[in-house]
Amino acid sequence: MKIPKLKINVDNSRHSRYPIDMSTNTHKKPIQPTGNFRAIPVAVPENLTNIRVILFEPREPGNIGSVARVVKGMGLSQLYLVNPVPFQDVDAAWYMAHGAQDILENCQVVSELKDALEGIQYLVGTTHRRRDVRLPQPVPAREAAQTIATLSQDKSVALLFGREDFGLSTDQLSLCQLSASVPMATKNPSLNLAQAVQIFAYEVFVASLEEYPPSEIDYAEVNALEEFYGRVTRLLDKVGMSPYNREWETYLKSLRRVFSRAPLEPRDIATLDMIFSTTYRYIERLEKKLESTQ
């Protein structure tokens, strides 16, 4: 007996980045209300809209897509990519973002980290390796998640992840008010980028299900802090101070550590700026007077 061949009609007009539905009409699953689909239905905490996930130079399009899926699944919406590998026309990115293509389509792609930090008041960096002793010791992901859930009630908070092969540099971690890590049983293997994002995002989601009072501290934006540190080092250079081997980046790490012991508010920066800026302008006036007498 001749067995008839199964003919499958494929609609080639659809873009290849979206997975093709190969199911037949006779085997379609019944449509279920979203609220009844998950085993444990929960209301999405509102503070999650204030949390940003930033990937610094991600190298794998598939990881970018997977992270987009994590972002949506954990109730987040902000995904920023800093100098990523081209991914928009790579099928793997869209396939791995299954169900979260909207996050991938609307993610923000920027060339520099400072652009991704625009508006961020509290930055949490992630790491797997032991770091410079001048940096604060990392806290477990769960503890960091509680801090993020608390501050994001009324402030903009970001989770920063490094590239797959190197992670975040020491300089990048020194920008963060808090560094965090996932406790693991062994040194290797380390977590895949998307796996790390999933763990942190889940911990933040669970922590956000609790109620927290808004923080009374009006945190200054991370970029405003960096601009302030730049003005401080400019003054120190003006008066002739020179760090060892003129390594200002190394000195900046120490400077950030000193000022991070107590959170700075915009009014704190304005107060300190008055001292440093007035001193800098005074020195400039003296220099001009000296030049005019020569």
Image (cartoon, rainbow, N blue to C red):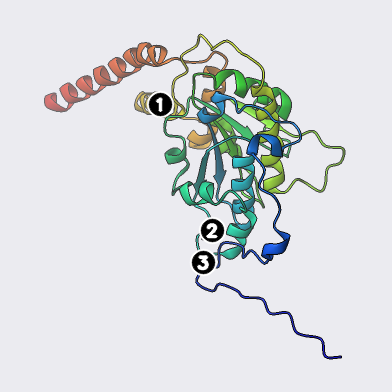
Residue at 47 percent across and 18 percent down: it is 219
Residue at 21 percent across and 19 percent down: it is 286
Q: Are marks 3 and 1 in contact (CB under 8 Å)?
A: no
Q: Are marks 1 and 2 in contact (CB under 8 Å)?
A: no
Distance between mark 1 and mark 2 Cα atoms: 29 Å
Q: Which residue corresponds to mark 1? A: 224
Based on the displayed image, in which of its 4 quarters is residue 261 positioned?
A: top right
Q: Which of 31 and 239 lies nearest the eye of the viewer?
A: 31
In the picture provided, is 227 more to the left or to the right than 176?
Answer: left
Based on the displayed image, in which of its 4 quarters is residue 54 positioned?
A: top right
Which is more N-terminal, label 2 or label 1?
A: 2
Q: Position of residue 13 (x, y in %)?
A: 50, 71
Which is more N-terminal, label 2 or label 3?
A: 3
Which is more N-terminal, label 1 or label 3?
A: 3
Distance between mark 3 and mark 1 Cα atoms: 43 Å
Q: Which residue corresponds to mark 2? A: 85
Question: Which quarter of the rendered picture does the N terminus lie within?
Answer: bottom right
What amino acid is labelled 3 in the image?
His
What amino acid is labelled 2 in the image?
Val
In the picture provided, is 267 more to the left or to the right than 244?
Answer: left
